[in-house]
Image (spheres, rainbow, N blue to C red):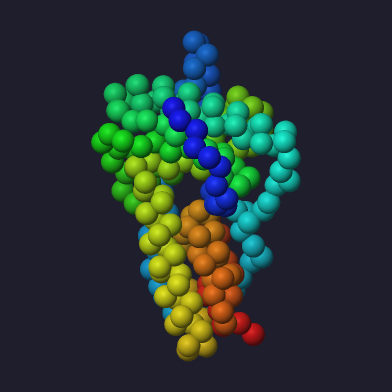
Amino acid sequence: MTAPQSTTETTAEATSEDAVTATDTGETALPDADAASADAVVESAEVVETTDGDDEDDDEDGDEDGDDLLVQEGDVAGDYLERLLDILDVDGDIDLDVEGDRASVAVVGGQLSTLIGPEGATLEALQELTRLAVAQSTGTRSRLMLDIGGFRAQRRADLTELAGAAASRVAASGTAERLAAMNPFERKVVHDVIAAAAGVRSESEGEEPNRRVVVLPET
């Protein structure tokens, strides 16, 4: 395992209601996976009903104790994922980092497509399992971010392009656009892009798993 220098990048995810239990040997068992959200497309938005904010926008106070906890989260997650890779007989290296106010873990190398799944479904489930394993060890809710095979990094790039195009259209037309349902990580990427664009703003509407971003002209 390697631990790269910390970067400042804030993302987020929804938490799972599944529970990770300990086996008789003290190792973490693996509950069933959750389904992933749909990919992002653009739709017209004539009526916008919004709710305030996203869970992923909540910030947590950071201090030295917090940094130590994030490092501990990364260590626990790394051990958990190493055991998982051994069980699945999948080759991969694990990189640990701290990005902003959360631990970041990446599995790189090898043939990792089976750990990503269709539209990242398996990745989303593994992230929730890893968070639960960390929470069980630390006693604290984890907001750890997991990436596998660079999938999440590529998804961030695609969403940045999509959000930028939507912002340009809305600024030019003055007509709101509603994007497809996204998970918290995806919505956070879009909100960040819209926040940096002129003449537009963004809000979220709906309930999980159908919560989505609406891009509106600035008033």
Q: Nearer the viewer, residue 196 or 19?
A: 196
Q: Residue at x 60, y 38 (%)?
A: 142
Relative placement, left or right, of 118 versus 72 is left
Q: Residue at x 53, y 54 (%)?
A: 184
Can the viewer see residue 15 in this picture? no
Vertical arrangement, residue 176 with respect to residue 92, above or below: below
Position of residue 75 measured from the top left corner of the image (x, y, whole percent): 54, 27
Relative placement, left or right, of 110 versus 58 is left
Q: Residue at x 73, y 46 (%)?
A: 61
Image quadrant of residue 19?
A: top right
Relative placement, left or right, of 61 versus 109 is right
Q: Nearer the viewer, residue 44 or 207?
A: 44
Position of residue 31 measured from the top left corner of the image (x, y, whole percent): 45, 30
Query: Quadrant location of the N terminus?
Result: top left
Position of residue 14 measured from the top left corner of the image (x, y, whole percent): 55, 48
Can the viewer see residue 21 in this picture? yes
Position of residue 110 measured from the top left corner of the image (x, y, whole percent): 27, 34
Query: Quadrant location of the C terminus?
Result: bottom right
